[in-house]
Structures are given as C-alpha cells and as structure tokens.
Amino acid sequence: MRRVMPPRAHLFSVVVVGCLAACTPLQTIQGATKIGQIMMNPDMPIGPPKDQPSKATIAIYVEEDANKNAFGQAAPVDVWLFQLSDDTRLRTLDFSTLSASPKDALGTSYVTHKEKQVEPGNSKVIEDWEIEEETSNIGVAVGYKDIDHINWRSLDAIKPKGETYKIVVAIRGRNVAIQTHR
C-alpha cells in the first residue's frame, strides 16, 4: 500500500528544505564543490595561487660554437641547475669543487638540483620544476672544456611562491646567462 503524504505535511517538508538551502552559506557550497574537484583530481592545488609553490619551465640552449675542444670542435656541455637558499656559495666556488659534489660544496645554500647534458646547437627543456619553499635563487653552472677562461656560472633571484617562471639558459662560446620571465 502506498502512503500518500497529506498536502500540509508535503508543504511543510518543502518549506523546511527551502529554508535550509537558503541558510546554507555560499562558501559551504563552494567548499563542497572544491572537495569534489580534489577527489576527481588529487594533484589539484589547494589555496589561492599566491600560496602555491612557484613553478619554472627552463629552456637550456647551447650555441653551435660553444664549448670547443682542443681541435676546435664544439663538444657537449654538462649543465647543473640549482635551487639555492642564497647565492653566496655558488659565486665563490671553483668549478672542480662544485662539480665533484654539488650538495657538499654548496652547503646550507643547496636546496636541490638537476643535471643535463646538451649538444651544441641543441636545446633541452625542463617543464614544471616546482620551486622549493626555501629557494631564493636559481643558479646554473656549465662544464666548459676551457673552464679557466670562461664565465661558467650565472644566478637569478626568484620567489618560491605564487609565480610561474619561464627561464632561458643561454650557453654561448665564452659565457652562460640566465633570463627569467614571469
């Protein structure tokens, strides 16, 4: 047997549900929506963009005549990209100390790093490198063949939160340069 709700009881239910819906703050509804989005995509950032870790896409380009060997032929270069808490150690180190053990050589300045080898006339891209919270500088060191007569390092300041960086590392015949764009 089907139970039919009297018209007054039905009207009361509609009024109660309507009042509850009207009293529900918009933020609660938005919060429930965000929770649903996070459940569907666990990698989704939480919080406003200014509170999110910065990310960097880094393009490393080596000119065709960079890093010539004793025979005048361009050779591949080893590239170290660093996240640093300050720039002091990288500015003062010699290349052989740095390349032997970057983490030990940079000490408390070291946050993390990536290594790449790039052929002359070519480029490599590092996409969406998340910037660590303690990072204040991006540094690059390049293993040139004639390291004593080359500007083999470069640095640039960055913010660890709220930014999306496009960084170009240009490796030329006698130096390396970083160009940072937001």
Image (tube, rainbow, N blue to C red):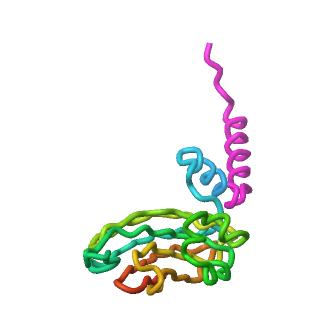
Q: Is residue 72 left or right of residue 45?
A: left
Q: Is residue 46 left or right of residue 118?
A: right
Q: Is residue 125 visible?
A: yes
From the top left corner, tell me how far across and down residue 17 is, in percent. 69, 45
**Residue 69 is one of the magenta-drawn residues:** no
Front position in the image: 85 or 92: 92
**Residue 20 is one of the magenta-drawn residues:** yes
Query: Residue at position x 72%, y 59% from top?
Result: 25
Query: Residue at position x 45%, y 77% from top?
Result: 167
Front position in the image: 19 or 118: 118
Query: Residue at position x 60%, y 73% from top?
Result: 162
Q: Is residue 179 visible?
A: no
Q: Residue furthest top?
A: 1
From the top left corner, tell me how far across and down residue 86 is, in percent. 68, 79
Q: Is residue 34 above or below residue 147?
A: above
From the top left corner, tell me how far across and down residue 53 is, in percent. 61, 67
Q: Residue furthest front?
A: 70
Looking at the magenta stretch, what is its main secondary structure?
helix
Which quadrant of the view contains residue 135? Answer: bottom right
Boundaries of the magenta span = 1-28
Which quadrant of the view contains residue 170? Answer: bottom left
Which quadrant of the view contains residue 74? Answer: bottom left
Front position in the image: 170 or 43: 170
- Tag count in the figure? 0
From the top left corner, tell me how far across and down residue 114 is, in percent. 52, 63
